[in-house]
Image (tube, rainbow, N blue to C red):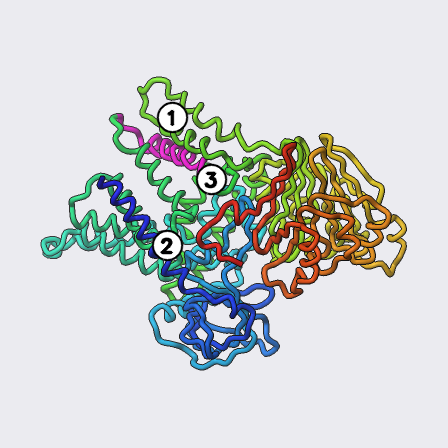
Amino acid sequence: MLKVFFLLSGFLYAALFADIRLSDSLPQKWEGRDIEITGVVADLPQSNAKGQYFRFDVEKADTPGAHVPEKIMLSRYDRKDGAVVHPGERWRFTVRLKRPHGDVNPYGFDFEAWLLERGIRATGYVRDGTLLKGFVARPFYLIESMREKLRKRILDTHSSYSGVIAALLMGDQKAISEKDWQTFRRTGVIHLMSISGLHVTMVAALFAFLAYRFWRNDPARMLWLPARKFSALIGLLSAFCYALLAGYAVPTQRTVYMLAVVAAALWSGRITSPTLILCWALFAVTLFDPWCVLSPGLWLSFAAVLFILYAGTGRIARKSWLNAWLSVQWAVTIGLVPILLVFFRQISLISPIANAVAIPVVSFVVVPLTLFGAISPFDFPFLLAAKIFSLLMLFLERLSDLPDAVWIQHAPLEWAVVGAFAGIFWLLLPKGFPVRWLGVSGIAPLFLFYSHGPQSMRLTVLDVGQGLSSVIETRHHALLFDAGPVFSPGSDSGNRIIVPFLVGSGISRLDGVILSHEDMDHIGGAISVLNAVPTGWLLSSLPEGNPVLLHAGLKFVCHGGQSWTWDEVRFEILSPDSAIYSNRKATSNERSCVLRVTSPDGSILITGDIDKGIQEKLASKSIIRADVLVVPHHGGSSSGKFIRAVSPRYAVFSVGYRNRFHHPRKDVVALYRDLGSRIVRTDEGGAAIFDFLPAGITGSSWRDAHRRYWYQEK
């Protein structure tokens, strides 16, 4: 009965936190309208190609009747006068805001949950602003201002890895190149490039050791306060200070809470079991941050400690330090496999070797040097740390270049994850237990079983914002139609949405890729996809010299009349005509590839951005009837004649939330609705998935099928 009480108490506690946070929201009627607000720049602004973005603490809304959440995220685009914002400054801004919204796709990043966890209840951009006060003297603003000055010191050294040094010291990762990120991912040391629990714990341990050595030298001090208690207190305070230097982000907060529990255990002298300390630490973390269970970092950090305890405690046999270290490395490596596959769908096979070198170098050489540089007036510690890291990078790059350095696979099934943990615990039992090798049978389903492809055909229209990307699967083949937009340098639909979806779905190869035309909202992620996923051929209307073509192997020009069959499913290109390529006045929209797919259980029509003229031409001369239509030009224009000729059961609008083109147009939506078509919008429902079965077509949107309480009604 007591367990039920605590279970209900935990649920009600989390629900109360959620209700309080969700109640501070932006009313829908104020989305996209000019609002004047006064507040303070709350954190270290980050820069990108367009300008700055930063968290803003709203003190008041100056526009009569407007309600604005207390914490918002703002973007401020580059100004001609070069003015920038700094932490702690009070500004009056004219802003346009929207409620939290992110792309919602299978195996994708949940941006709305990330905002909720950080208390950010609206996002938007600055239209105009006036500086009211140069600095607001509050503790956290003072810390952010110090961090800004420290970042400038580091980046002004202009060393090759100054961005890495800033990341290790302050958690500011924006200056790290995409090439270096790729090396970190492939070698499995990416966790070192942020202020991780390991770094905070290392700093706490270092200062605790120094405090212990200092305190124990004086018997009078020892009588007043034991050295272990004093060192625990100093270690906790140093961890807290380091977390503040790192911006006191959620992951560092969790580590501080864990260390606080350990310090409390040492001070009380009542908790002796490491497992009990771990449980209390988990309780403290979830108490202050109920949303932490959504973070991969929580599961990875606590699981790592759990497996270290499981492999290193309660064993009778004494091991040498080398054997003990190897057994712990083995336990952590194998123990984290299910979690890594669930969250990231990949495992670095060379991670144990890379981490065996990188962890000591970074934790005991590079980080201490950067800390010394932060508290000293000299810059040479930063330069020395960057030089040492450059030598480490030579080693990591060699490892990264090894073939098959990373194991990439589908998302594991839920029951396989549970069975894998049971198998791992059995496999790690102490020597002497019989048939420990049977643990392998529990781990094997993690790799062998996955959700199979469609019985006949499946269409997934991904939520890529204002753009288009669709995946068509048959029993043994997969086709990508368009690759969505670019979001920012180094971030596009390909690496952020499409590739994670393909990997998570178990699609290891694309038999074909079709790029309808050269608009960037349709081909922005193509290069990322072609570089990451083996592809059979590329069919497009792209002009010669387009950079995408340089990354393709077998490539063809699309034109009406092309067709092929996969698994009893017929694919045919209906447009454009071959003659259009010789017409220099033809627009890229007129050259859009139009694909019709027909299976025994239904049909699909994907049209790119064809205009009314092409639509009516198709309606006059082609059989274009389809059960599912991906609406032309995101609903910006549609011909009534074309709509009647297609007569779709489902009309899919691939559009961005509150996009600047105001797509889809209301009159276009009305045409489909009057015909009886079911309207499906990616901005409202996320990715749209259609399964074509002998019993009929089933359509669902990802938001509806995987509802979360923080998904607001659109």
Residue 497 rendering spot, x and y as whole percentages:
59, 48
Residue at 65% from the left image edge and 53% from the top image edge: 654
Find disc 2 in the rendering and name its residue.
252
Q: Which residues are magenta?
A: 317-342
Q: Quadrant of the N terminus?
A: top left
For the residues labelled 2 and 1, the Cα–Cα distance comes to 32 Å
Disc 2, SS: helix
Left or right of 70, for residue 179 = right
Instruction: Give the farthest residue toward the top.
Output: 434
Q: Is residue 484 visible?
A: no
Find disc 3 in the rendering and name its residue.
340
Disc nearer the start of the sequence (2/3): 2
User: Is 126 covered by the magenta stretch?
Assistant: no
Q: Quadrant of the C terminus?
A: bottom right
Amino acid at circle 2: Thr
Find disc 1 in the rendering and name its residue.
427
Residue at 40% from the left image edge and 74% from the top image edge: 59
Residue contact at pointers 2 and 3, CB within 8 angstroms: no
Amino acid at circle 1: Leu
- Which of the 4 image quarters holds residue 214? bottom left
Q: Which of 50/583 is in front?
A: 583
Residue contact at pointers 3 and 1, CB within 8 angstroms: no
Disc nearer the start of the sequence (3/1): 3
Q: Is residue 23 visible?
A: yes
Disc nearer the start of the sequence (2/1): 2
Disc 3, SS: helix
Residue 277 rendering spot, x and y as whole percentages:
25, 43
Left or right of 558, for residue 264 = left
Q: Which of 655/666 is in front?
A: 666
For the residues labelled 2 and 3, the Cα–Cα distance comes to 20 Å
